[in-house]
Image: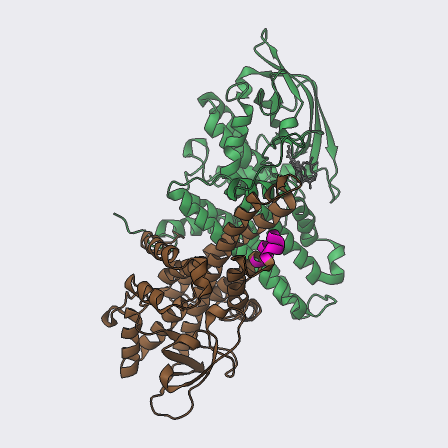
Chain colours: A brown, B green
Amino acid sequence: MRLAPTADEELFARTVRAVLERRCAPREVRAGFARGRWAELAEIGVTGLLVPEEHGGLGLGAGALVAVAEEAGRACAPEPVVEAAVAATLLARVDADGRAREWLRALAVGAAVPAVRLAGPGTAPVAHAAHANFVLVADGDTLYGRSAAEAYIHPAPGVDPGRGLAYVDMSMSPDGLLAVRQEQAVTRAARLGAIGAAADLLGAARAMLDLTVRHARQRHQFGRPIGSYQAVKHQLADVLSAVEFAHPVVLRAAYSHEHGRPSAGRDAAMAKVFASDAADLAARSCLQVHGAIGYTQECDLVLWLRRVWALSAAWGDAAHHRAAIAADLLGPAPAPPCP
Amino acid sequence: MLAQVTDLIFSVTEEAFRREIRDWLARHVPSEPLPSMDTPDGFEAHRRWERHLYDARWAVVSWPAEYGGRGASLVEWLIFEEEYWRSGAPGRVSQNGIFLFAPAVFAYGTEEQKRRVLPPMAAGEEIWVQGWSEPEAGSDLAALRSRAVRDGRRGGWRLTGQKTWSSRGTYGHRMFGLFRTDARAERHHGLTYLMVDLAADGVTVRPIRQLGGEPGFAEVFLDDVFVPDADVLGEPGEGWRVAMSTTGDERGLSLRGPGRFLAAADRLVELYRRVSAGEEAGTDTPNAFRDAVVDAWMRAESYRLYTFRTVTRLGDGQRVGAQSSLNKVFWSELDLNLHATAQRLLGPWAETGGPWLDGYLFSLAGPIYAGTNEIQRNVIAERLLGLPKEPKGSNGEKGEKGEGR
Ligand SMILES: Cc1cc2nc3c(=O)[nH]c(=O)nc-3n(C[C@H](O)[C@H](O)[C@H](O)COP(=O)(O)OP(=O)(O)OC[C@H]3O[C@@H](n4cnc5c(N)ncnc54)[C@H](O)[C@@H]3O)c2cc1C
């Protein structure tokens, strides 16, 4: 029995953190997606994390994605780290297709940026499509893919400008369209996306908490640091609790996913519920503790607030996943728990 | 070097351990629930059950064999708890002894004390009660006033004062507690950890009825009660350190392992199934409660996972420390949430009583005992987040409490 990130994952996370600390300061986050940073992330293996080794990637799994996505969330990196992992698992299934192989290789070296949407209404915009080189969209159990240059892409408004939301229409002609039926793979990939997003949300929640603790120690009112007041302390204690208790849930989901446990679907759903709820709580409490300065574009808190507002609903919001858990748990044959 | 991979599998030995305890419980758990341990008959019935557990070496699995245990690992301990509560076995009347006092005895007791105190405690022969709280010392434990003066002639201490809210104090045999042995020292200085025989001359016990109606705890008046030197745990004057050394590690893991909440969560799911099948007539449509049931169940699961994470940390040689405050807030709110959800599901039947109502009333105490949740949140904010302490003077430093019930 061992529930913890592995030494390799921790080392990898530290490497990613070092790069992002250097290349993804709040000022740079404000500037949005950066191809240079994507290339630098590629150099340390982030973009090809789940790309099979024969296509130039690291061939790692969900555990590694959790470690990396947490860092992306912590730094508020605008790059589609989770989408790259999801795209890699989908494309690896169809690597007999020339385009799939090409995209996999391009992903691994950071030459291509992916955008992916596996669920939700077909008319909804796709995150990262505004700066993507190729787009993957699932419709039911069919996966469609097209290079961005051959699709109609119109930027859409979004609460988090870093996400590069855009409407995508790839139905113009069958030429150049990847279309494969693969129901299981789409379900599995959506699970991976939920787990990655959950890790990202926890990283973002921790970053907001750090920022807010710093503020609460410095800001004085009534002659005392506001962080010495219990009404402030208890709010932040609850945020820490939510994050700390969500973390093992996310680690477990990655494990169940990688090991194909019968409860993998429920475990991933639970990870997203806990992470979305924790990050939503962090966003609200951290804004409250900042006071008016938190309600401005000048304060860096806004960067994470926007990320959480968007991401807590992406890859299935908490209500969606709760319903899925209810269907399994309260249904005729709940999956046996892991462990 | 060993590859430290994530591994959510119980080993062959652990699985065998699980089967062994499961089989034993299936054969021995009383088919009818015992009467409440807070009644005279129930107290004795629960002691007999502890004896039964002890004879089969299931009473204190994590203790070394020489004191009646099996030297079980932390994971085996968690497995024991899961199986124990799943089987519907009786509550542990000896719990404040075996879970809260024993760790201090192991850490600070002499060989003689360990041999004398631990086996009868584990066998349910001697039920220990915790004597920390006093009328003027609740959350602020260091404000305690009960004092002990030196009796050099007889070689011991004479105690005077009052303890209160001592769980099982009504029928229990012995009390462990903190006493002021240095009248000039203040707050957490000059305290001594003592063992008191509740049958000794000068002890008066006044039972106190709890919300549910039974005398689950008691006030203990001490009037010149003699305690021999052999019953001092650790050094005189070191009581605070002795008491605090074990609260951190023990608060979450041993007093309230995840097993009992998992069992309650499974029963809640069953209750939901019965209610939605129309077998139990609640007023509301069951669907309104679906999310509440799922949430309560998930919290129990997450407490289990968090515990495995903690066990992994301990195995890696890390210390848990103030993180146990996160544990305490989480399990107490989880327990309350589980039972409140069951009460809502039962609708008009909720008030008619039964195990869910009993459990609900008990869960209401969780945020109060073992250090109130407000105090725990202060600890979390100050020790884990590094927020500034409250200014001294207004309420001084706070003692960190770790009582169980
Ligand atoms: C069922 C049950 C069993 C118990 N069993 C035992 C036992 O066996 N042995 C034993 O010694 N004790 C026992 N206790 C007592 C328990 O330890 C105390 O109730 C607890 O420490 C709180 O003390 P108090 O009740 O005096 O409340 P108080 O300390 O008076 O607190 C009252 C309220 O004020 C809040 N408060 C106090 N100080 C602060 C602060 N600094 N900041 C914020 N809020 C604050 C508290 O959180 C609480 O909400 C038991 C209690 C219960 C309910």
Magenta span? A283-294
Task: Establish if B222 lies above or below A296.
Answer: above
Q: On the picture, is A321 further left or further right than B310? A: right
What residue is shown at x 59% (from left), y 44% (from top)?
A: A227
**Can residue B383 be seen from the camera position used here?**
yes
Ligand 1 sits in quadrant: top right
| The one of B294 and B72 positioned closer to us in this rendering | B294
What residue is shown at x 70% (from left), y 70% (from top)?
A: B285
Measured as percent of width and height from the top left, residue B177 is found at 60, 26
Which quarter shows the C terminus of chain B?
Answer: top right
Determine the image quadrant of residue A116. Answer: bottom left
| The one of B62 and A51 positioned closer to us in this rendering | A51
Q: On the picture, is B320 further left or further right than B129? A: left
Magenta span dominant secondary structure: helix
Measured as percent of width and height from the top left, residue A266 is found at 49, 66
Q: Is residue B260 magenta?
A: no
Task: Establish if A142 lies above or below B30.
Answer: below
| The one of A28 and A236 positioned closer to us in this rendering | A28
